[in-house]
Image (cartoon, rainbow, N blue to C red):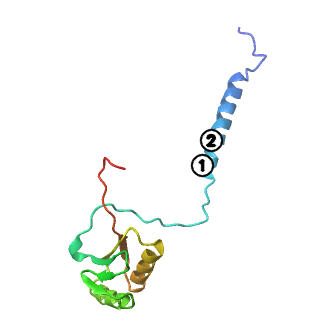
Amino acid sequence: MPAPISKIEITPLVGVALILVIVFMVTSPLMMVPTNLEIDLPKAKTVEAKSETNITISVSADLILALNENQVQINQLQHELEKMLKENKDRLVVIRADKNLTHENVLELLSIAKRAGASRMAVATLQRNRGTL
């Protein structure tokens, strides 16, 4: 008959406990993001849109505006845009702004487009080649 176990080995138990402590220390900061805010992030699309259905607002460095290919004044832009969007609310409004304009100018155009009823908007940029940064 074997001798009764008089001593319990706790070394493996201590090893497992320390590994669990390390795992909890590493994963706890990842779980501490604020979850009380519900944010619905937009999905980014990098494909080129079909240009025949787009409405394009172009603005030059000296603040000359054009809606598609027709030059307009800033105070007429919202009214003209409303007329174009009345036909189809889902048309994409593309803002082509000169790179030397301030963000304030671009934000003002986005605001005008939003007030006119545009639900889909984009800011045009030059496409870069995959090999360049």
- Residue nearer the viewer, 75 or 114: 75
Task: Residue at 27%, 64% (x, y): give it.
Answer: 48
Q: In the displayed structure, would residue 126 be above or below residue 117?
A: above
Task: Residue at 38%, 62% (x, y): give it.
Answer: 44
Can residue 48 be spotted in the picture?
yes
In which quarter of the view is residue 7 placed?
top right
Q: In the displayed structure, would residue 126 be above or below residue 55?
A: above
**Position of 62 compared to 15: left or right?**
left
Query: Which mark, by number, is residue 45?
Result: none
Is the residue marked by circle 1 packed among few (<14), some (14-19), or many (20+) residues within 10 Å? few
Where's residue 5, x and y in %?
75, 16
Q: Please, what secondary structure does the residue beneath circle 2 have? A: helix
Kindly give the residue lying farthest to the left in the view shown.
52
Q: Which residue is mark 2?
A: 26
Question: Quick one: quadrant of the N terminus?
Answer: top right
In the image, what residue type sits under mark 1? Answer: Leu
Q: Which residue is mark 1?
A: 30
- Mark 1 near mark 2, Cβ–Cβ under 8 Å? yes
- Residue nearer the viewer, 77 or 15: 77
In which quarter of the view is residue 46 placed?
bottom left
In the image, what residue type sits under mark 2? Answer: Val
Where's residue 107, x and y in %?
45, 76
- Residue nearer the viewer, 33 or 20: 33
Q: Please, what secondary structure does the residue beneath circle 1 have? A: helix
Where's residue 61, x and y in %?
37, 74
